[in-house]
Amino acid sequence: MENIIKLNKDDILRLEIVTSDGEKTGNDLKFDLSDIELPLKYQELLEKDEKNKKNLRNQLLIIEKRQDVKGKKLLSKNQEDEIKAIQEFFKKETEVYNMFLGDNGVQKLLNGRKFTWTTLNEIDELIVNQILPHLDLSMTKIQEKVKEKYGQAVARNKEVLKADEWLS
């Protein structure tokens, strides 16, 4: 007999990434649907995303209220600072989304394009339409498995507690 370990069937959602023309990019996104922390990662994405947006709004408001002066080159100082604030926002958003999408998930979805405002909308649509339905279904399955496995033990414990009350 060989010394081998046969792994159980995995519960990995693999989403192949193709261009708008349908050409394969060679990249994909993978989600372990049995990972109980995946919904927490998505919740954290939403929270950090909102925090990043609020921070950007505040920065842009401060820049807008400042007196503008001539910049180093073509743009004014305020315009330069706005661009820097937006670049920093895109950098933070990439980190936040990659936390959920996996290593270089945003870069895989961009497929060589630059991160823009429409990128955020595209990624949000992808998550809502193609990932969350699987995540919701997976969470329902996990809850059912927990109830199935531990529900009987809980019912027995309740019966034991009732019997203890009766005896005392």
Image (spheres, rainbow, N blue to C red):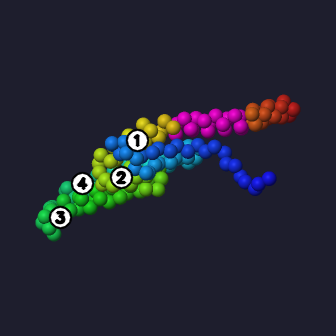
Residue 9 x, y percent position in the rendering: 63, 43
Mark 4 burial class by Cα count in 10 Å: few <14, some 14-19, many 20+: few
Q: CB of mark 2 within 8 Å of CB of mark 3?
A: no
Which callout, 3 or 1, points to the residue nearer the camera?
1
Tell me how far mark 1 sits from mark 4, CA to CA.
31 Å
Q: Which residues are magenta?
A: 135-151
Residue ID at (20%, 62%): 80
In the rendered view, would you say 84 is above or below 110? below
Tell me how far mark 2 sits from mark 3, CA to CA.
32 Å
Q: Quadrant of the C terminus?
A: top right
Which of the labelled discs sits on residue 61, or is there none? 4
Q: Earlier in the sequence, mark 1 or mark 4?
A: 4
Q: Which residue is mark 1?
A: 126
Spot the residue most to the right: 167
Residue situated in front as seen by the camera: 141 or 17: 17
Which of the labelled discs sits on residue 104, or is there none? none
